[in-house]
Image (tube, rainbow, N blue to C red):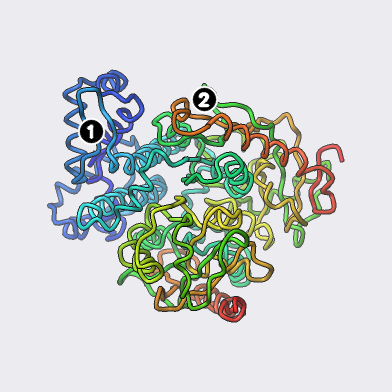
Amino acid sequence: MDMEGLHSFVAVAREKSISRAAQALHVTQPTLSARLKKLERDLGVSLLDRSWDGIRLTKHGRFFLTYSIGMFEALEEAATLLRRRGERTAGGPIDAITDALRLRVGVESFFFPAFMKPLVRGIQAAVPDAECKFVTKTSELLLSLADCDSLDLCLHYTTGPRPNLVSHHLANDRFVLLYPKTGYPDIRPDMSNAHLLKDKRFVLFESAPLLSFPKVTSQAFLKLFGDIPDRFHIVQDIEAALDIVAGGFGYTFVPVTSIYQLLGGPLPFHARLMPEAYLSLPILLSHASAPASPQPVAELSAVILSALQAYVQQIDPAYRLA
Amino acid sequence: MDMEGLHSFIAVAREKSISKAAQALHVTQPTLSARLRKLEEGLGVTLLARSWDGIRLTKEGRFFLSYSVDLFQQVEEAAAILNQDGGGGILERPLEAIANERRLRIGIESFYYPAFLPAIIAGVRSVVPDAECRFVNKTSDLLTGMVDCDSLDLCLNFNYVGDLHPHSRLVQFDRAVLLVPSEGYPHIEDDLSNAPLLADRPFILFDNSPLRQYSEVTERVFHHLLGRVPERFHIVNDVTVMADMLSCGFGYTFIPRSSLLHLMGGPLPFRAIELEADFLISPVFITLSQTAAGRHPIEEIGRAITDRLKASMEEAFVGKEAYGYRRKGG
């Protein structure tokens, strides 16, 4: 796959016509068609429906369009910032971003709102003068970054062996069922009447979490309803999911660490901790086995781990949600 | 540029050696070197420093590495999801839901995202209570691009550089606010006269997209406020992370005040002081798709969201001194 293919696909989606897209990109129609065919071949699905009255995106095409626009934009952005860097001699913000002396910490996007403060306090205690970079992304991406030395520390879900990293177990995550306070039936702690939710709108995460849909989410649906529901709100991240449930607009189940930061006060929705049979997912703190950073990463990792352990023990969701 | 180039670059960064990377990718060294050169030529920068004792990433290389990993991962992810759907159909319902054009698809600029969501959800519910929605959290440029490709029905965006999107409408003007921890930091006067005291503390900087969109604005504010560009930075990619760092007393920053909307219901966990209004700060815009009208009462939804946001933005910042919010002029 190459960027020309992505660019061509985005142009066709915008112009809704092969000939106009070819004009906009200053290429011939056969060139454009060849690029699109190559993209479809690389992905193994057809993205476009070619019919006598024009061109339309297939279901897969509409799904892939968000990715294409995002990737194309990211690449433009990288190129622009690199060019600006080249034009400047002095330091400043753009240099700061590339500075490897910074302590670089990644946190899984499902639970960063819960762990950010204890994490920052741990870092402050150990290296008060450190300058930091915090990255909130999926565990898979964080581990890939750590693997090529682009992160010093990361807090993540387990996703297969990583020989370059040293990992410490922090806690096991499990699902919590969240539903609005009004207009919804009360769900028993053993989930025995959860099927009452089936015709409500479920808040579904797109992109990376979909990869675990067949193994995790769909299994949970089958246990709860005997079927997979078909009414959904789609979100990219946990903050939107929580706002939707709090706004009375839908229900969902998410890892319980996603609401740790809210457990100190009254919750804006009902929350039922689901049995571990639905999900039991280890959370790990990892750092490079041979860190290249000038920071004392291994020592720092030990300090942060104990700060996080203290925080996790104090939360005790089973007790607070009982 | 192609994925082979990105993949090769990531492998070299991971293995710290051309020969080991070539082995890992099952290609010859000359092939790998050619791919890397092509990538560097495409970008117009040197990513790798080759010396007698091995290979190292340049500063540009380190910067580009996180993009490469991200891009590569996205391609892999999209391909994996599409292929899973091809075999067995277990992803049929979620994919159908995501790709469904009848869904109401709403984009929100990342800076506004946590702040605006409750008002947007309430606005949507008031007009189309039964709608199924998709909420997308991205940068403004990307969102207006998605509206153009018919992949969003409306978005809330700002506009710092370039022309305003022809279908963007004003929601509300905005202000910049300086955010300073309440403890462990010098007390900054309401007139900001002693703001240069902050200059040796770490400034919380948003990486990448915001930096591209308004690095010049940021530098102007730096000079106005501190008399120079600071040298110490924390880097973040999320407004919530920024707020947590401020409340821990780990750094200071300035942002559009509308990003604080969701926090104005009680005392702020930090101090907020408005800056002069004549700085270039983008108003908040709403952009409606011109083709959405056949699917949704888009004008009505747009109006409901605009009215709610406008009303809450007008009152949220008035008389909140007790919450730690200082308006310009007292």
Residue type at numbered disc 2: His
Q: SS of the residue at dot 1?
A: strand
**Residue sitting farthest toward the right:** B330
**Res B153 label:** none
Q: The numbered mark 2 sits on a residue in which chain?
A: B
The answer to whether residue B235 of the structure is visible from this angle is: no
Q: Is residue B137 above or below residue A226?
A: above
Q: Is residue A191 above or below residue B90?
A: below
**Res B165 label:** 2
Q: SS of the residue at dot 2?
A: loop
Q: Percent from the top left, x then y, of residue A194?
A: 47, 69
Task: Give me the C-alpha separation between circle 1 and circle 2.
Answer: 29 Å
Q: Is residue A244 above or below residue A14?
A: below
The answer to whether residue B244 of the structure is visible from this angle is: yes
Neighbor class of circle 2 (other Cα within 10 Å; few <14, some 14-19, many 20+) is some
User: Observer-nearest residue: A156 or A305?
Assistant: A156
Left or right of A300? Residue B150 is: left
Q: Looking at the image, which residue is at 30% across and 72% down?
A: A161
User: Observer-nearest residue: A299 or B53?
Assistant: A299
Q: Looking at the image, which residue is at 40% across and 52% down?
A: A206
Q: Percent from the top left, x then y, of residue B17?
A: 25, 58
User: Observer-nearest residue: A228 or A210?
Assistant: A228
Q: Percent from the top left, x then y, of residue B208?
A: 48, 43
Q: Percent from the top left, x then y, of residue B1?
A: 27, 38
Q: How many marks?
A: 2
Residue type at numbered disc 1: Asp
Neighbor class of circle 1 (other Cα within 10 Å; few <14, some 14-19, many 20+) is few
Quarter placement of the N terminus of chain A: top left
Residue ID for mark 1 = A49
Q: Looking at the image, which residue is at 32% across and 59% down?
A: A211
Asked if labels 1 and 2 share a chain, the reply is: no
